[in-house]
């Protein structure tokens, strides 16, 4: 029996907070699960599961959890293997039709392979966020994104790469069942969910995408960098640049030439950062890292980075499915202007079914609280919204 969404909110808050600070016990992952080549990967259809292993330690709320490796396609249409988790409730789905699928896009834990959401380091943050979705009886599939944990380059907040990773994860779960799919992501995961919503009708028309939850998404790269410059999270500005260098090796020299020696050293160091490493790197201004003292946000609109920035900006292609946008008013990790701008752009592009919810916790003394709190506070409303979407699918 499914739990009422509103009544479940208290459980979500308690369980999520408890598990977020407690380590999740999981068996070590064999390195070859992620790195061993998949013979004939090109021959597999996008979304095909090419490797899987059970993770019984994560069988929460009466579910069966597997770590999976599935086939996707990078922005150049080359076959790539992407890792993630597939969590399936054991009890029968009580509703009509096939069990709905939540394609969950995790937030960022960093850009080093060890930070991936299905790894031991990422699980403590990934699993608590899935609890409310699993308790509703939905099947949940997560993605680690292309090149995060697996061979290849991870393009942080890359629009096409992240969208395809999410949509092919949904294919891995839905297979040929025609199950209704809801895209779900918060923070960096919100970018992936939003990008997937924009590209679903062209890249994955076979999927029955009925909606997308987009929480606190830094959908505009320039706005994001400008907001992080000089903050405690300044090192995360470099994630985007490192990802562009990896995704566009033909432009690597021109991009690196925009930075001075200190900047290039910081770029290299940041590619092995998880969250705590970024914080430990300390605050700085991007002008101190660039070759000519120009801010990074200005460079991202210039001739070298500008075209790549435009490619990774969300909001100019209208999703065809309903969208819910959620954000905290005082969020300092991702400023609320990002979500307001995204909604404005989508409406201008022709989107007609956009629900926007803003949370004001009055946390001026602890502004960083809003980023996490809005994610948790959104569950009652988002679960009811998802219930309605799948009921009419």
Image: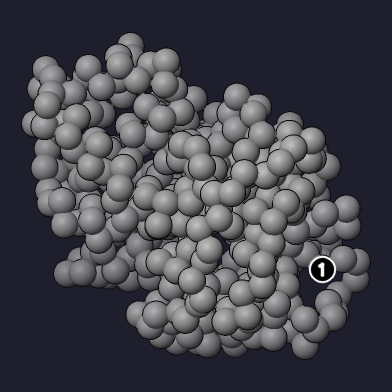
Q: Is residue 23 left or right of residue 50?
A: left
Count the marks. 1
Considering every residue shown, the one lying at the far top of the view is 303
> How many other residues sit within 10 Å of disc 1, few (<14), some (14-19) or many (≥20)?
many
Q: Residue beneath label 1, please?
A: 99
Using the image, determine if residue 229 lies above or below residue 327: above
- Location of residue 84 by image quarter: bottom right
Residue sitting at x 12%, y 26%: 261
Asked whether 309 or 148 is in front, the reply is 148
Left or right of 55, for residue 119: left
> Does any portion of residue 216 appear in the rendered image?
no
- Please provide percent x and percent y for residue 314: 50, 35
Percent from the top left, x then y, of residue 326? 48, 57
Q: Is residue 228 left or right of residue 284?
A: right
> Which residue is at the front of the view, 373 or 127?
127
Residue 338: give x, y in percent of width and height: 39, 44
Q: Which quarter of the figure has residue 333? A: bottom left
Q: Residue at x 45, y 87 (%)?
A: 14
Q: Nearer the viewer, residue 252 or 3?
A: 252
Residue that appears at 77% across and 88% down: 1
| Percent x, y of residue 24 | 45, 79
Please identify the quadrant where the C terminus is shown: bottom right
Q: In screen coordinates, is 324 left or right of 219?
A: right
Q: Say if residue 69 shows up in the picture.
A: yes
Task: Specify how the rendered protein is coloured.
Answer: one colour
Q: Residue at x 83, y 42 (%)?
A: 206
């Amino acid at each position: 029996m499914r739990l009422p969404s509103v009544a479940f909110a208290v459980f979500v808050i308690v369980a999520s907070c408890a598990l977020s600070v407690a380590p999740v016990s999981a068996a070590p992952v064999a390195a070859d699960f992620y790195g061993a080549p998949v013979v004939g990967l090109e021959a597999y259809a996008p979304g095909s599961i090419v490797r899987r292993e059970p993770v019984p330690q994560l069988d929460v709320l009466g579910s069966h959890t597997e770590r999976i490796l599935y086939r996707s396609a990078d922005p150049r249409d080359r076959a790539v293997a992407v890792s993630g988790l597939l969590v399936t409730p054991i009890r029968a789905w009580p509703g009509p039709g096939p069990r709905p699928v939540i394609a969950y896009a995790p937030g960022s834990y960093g850009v080093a392979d060890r930070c991936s959401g299905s790894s031991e380091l990422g699980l403590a943050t990934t699993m608590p966020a899935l609890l409310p979705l699993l308790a509703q009886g939905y099947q949940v599939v997560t993605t680690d994104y292309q090149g995060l944990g697996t061979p290849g380059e991870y393009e942080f907040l890359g629009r096409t790469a992240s969208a395809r990773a999410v949509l092919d994860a949904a294919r891995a779960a839905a297979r040929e069942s025609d199950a209704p799919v809801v895209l779900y992501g918060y923070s960096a995961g919100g970018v992936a969910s939003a990008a997937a919503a924009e590209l679903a009708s062209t890249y994955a028309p076979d999927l029955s995408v009925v909606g997308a939850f987009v929480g606190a998404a830094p959908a505009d790269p320039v706005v994001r960098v400008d907001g992080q410059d000089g903050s405690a999270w300044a090192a995360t500005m470099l994630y985007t640049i490192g990802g562009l260098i990896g995704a566009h090796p033909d432009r690597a020299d021109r991009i690196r030439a925009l930075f001075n020696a200190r900047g290039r050293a910081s770029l290299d160091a940041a590619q092995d950062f998880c969250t705590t490493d970024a914080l430990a790197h300390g605050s700085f201004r991007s002008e101190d890292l660039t070759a000519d003292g120009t801010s990074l946000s200005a460079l991202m609109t210039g001739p070298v980075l500008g075209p790549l920035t435009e490619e990774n900006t969300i909001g100019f292609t209208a999703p065809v499915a309903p969208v819910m946008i959620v954000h905290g008013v005082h969020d300092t990790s991702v400023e609320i202007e990002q979500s307001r701008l995204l909604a404005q752009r989508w409406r201008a592009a022709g989107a007609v079914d956009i629900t926007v919810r803003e949370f004001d916790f009055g946390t001026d003394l602890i502004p960083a609280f809003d980023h996490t709190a809005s994610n948790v506070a959104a569950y009652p409303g988002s679960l009811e919204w998802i219930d309605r979407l799948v009921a009419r699918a």
